[in-house]
Amino acid sequence: MGSDRSVDCAVIGLGYIGLPTAAVLARSGTRVCGVDVSPHVVETVGSGGIHIEEKDLDALVRQVVADGLLTTSLTVPQADVFVIAVPTPFKDDHAPDIAYVLSATRSIAPALKAGDTVILESTSPVGTTEAIRDVLAEARPDLRLPHEGQEGATVAVAYCPERVLPGKIIEELVSNDRSIGGITPACAEKARAFYKRFVAGECTITTARTAEMVKLVENASRDVNIAFANELSVICDTLALDVWEVIRLANRHPRVNILQPGPGVGGHCIAVDPWFIVHSDPDNARLIRTARHVNDDKVAYTVGRADALIEACDGPVACLGLAFKANIDDLRESPAMAVASALARRWGDRIRIVEPYIDALPAAFDGTGARLVPLHEALRDSAVAVVLVDHDAFRAVPAAARAHLAVHDSRGIWNGAPR
């Protein structure tokens, strides 16, 4: 658990990015305090445990806690560097919600001192780093906060988003390049010096606003490319073509690289971040907005395809997967979750959910009659299978074990199975 003494770095938010970042930073020899609003999270991590699923994270956290390099606290200690890694969801109208970022900033203000550095890692709309600066300036008029073109700031403020893949976060926090944007060049230089403690990839300096946009563009680009694949899958269904074969053959062209379709797009990044760009310039973000709608609409399309198959068959239905991508436990913005919960609301206790990375069904399934069951039981007892996530365990199911099933495979992992 935390202590009152100053640390080298305070990481605000111990979620899917904050906790791995704190652990990797501590491994470099930096004294880190992880701060979170959840007593459960603070107690779990402070005792050397983890509350999220991520490859190699459990052993790393256990080691750095045992070494005294990672402590936890419900309150922000004094530190030389403060890293904000809290959620940035969107509101019902798709407007970005930076309330958690601003709340974390206010929590830092009392502990701030001259010479400190504040770094935002949360994916945020353009201008958020400047908003942090303004909150700190209002809360701490005794300190000089940075402004472009001005010198003499006593606190540095910068933006440095992660670009990691769930399941490889520990590795990629170290190996991937970083875009580091400062309110001023001096802020960026201070932030780069901090990241070079543990980042082997190249740390490129730019402005805070550019770095914010770079992160959004990376995820919006992925979203647009996935939307092409998802739209293509619907067109191929209409024309009675195998979209997987079409993509496989098209990708033999040396300058074509079509991604794989699915039941939609999930996760806290790709399904959310493009809306930040749309909100910032709604008149011109036409393609980005359309891609979001294409990918969101694929959920309803998948539900419709599954409904038709279920209606034509008797017996239980196995929904395979709830996570937003393969081999992780993260259900945030998951299209698989949306499809499975919609089917559960309609078909009730006929639905069997298979998700090997969770121990209990989320609240979205309360009152539906759907049950969480092991894969072998679902395959044995069901008449229909709806493949929603390409977990390795699902890919490995032999043809003989699924020969009796009517299948809708939204991931294309069972070659030869009817979709």
Image: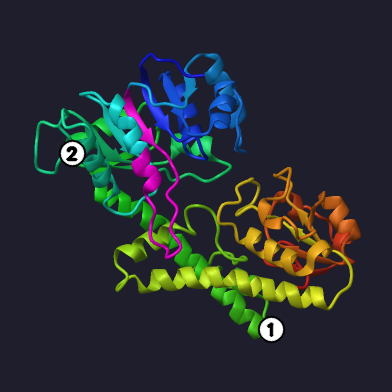
Q: Give coordinates of residue 222: x percent, y percent.
A: 46, 60
> Which of the pair 180/108 is nearer the observer?
108
Does residue 333 belong to the magenta stretch? no
The image shows a total of numbered marks equal to: 2
Q: Give coordinates of residue 199: x percent, y percent.
A: 40, 32
Residue drawn at (61%, 69%), measured in percent from left and top? Answer: 299
Determine whether the residue tagged by mark 1 lies in a helix, strand or loop: loop
Residue drawn at (34%, 43%), measured in percent from left and top? Answer: 102
Q: Give coordinates of residue 259: x percent, y percent.
A: 54, 64
Please name the amino acid that badge 2 sits on.
Pro
Residue 60 in view (yes/no): no
Does residue 88 belong to the magenta stretch? yes
Q: Quadrant of residue 218?
A: bottom left
Q: Which residue carries the number 2 mark?
A: 185
Residue 16 in view (yes/no): yes
Question: Taking 274 as reference, is 109 left or right?
Answer: left
Residue drawn at (68%, 50%), measured in percent from left and top? Answer: 362
Q: Which residue carries the number 1 mark?
A: 240
Please name the amino acid that badge 1 sits on.
Ala
Question: Taking 176 as reference, is 151 left or right?
Answer: left
**Above/below status of 390 relative to 136:** below
Q: Quadrant of residue 400?
A: bottom right
> Which of the pair 284/71 is nearer the observer?
71
Q: Nearer the viewer, mark 1 or mark 2?
A: 2
Distance from Cα at disc 1 to Cα at disc 2? 56 Å
**Above/below status of 159 relative to 68:** below
**Above/below status of 252 relative to 76:** below
Which residue is situated farthest in the bottom direction here? Answer: 239
Determine whether the residue tagged by mark 2 lies in a helix, strand or loop: helix
Part of the protein shown in magenta: 79-103
> Which of the pair 317/4 is nearer the observer?
4
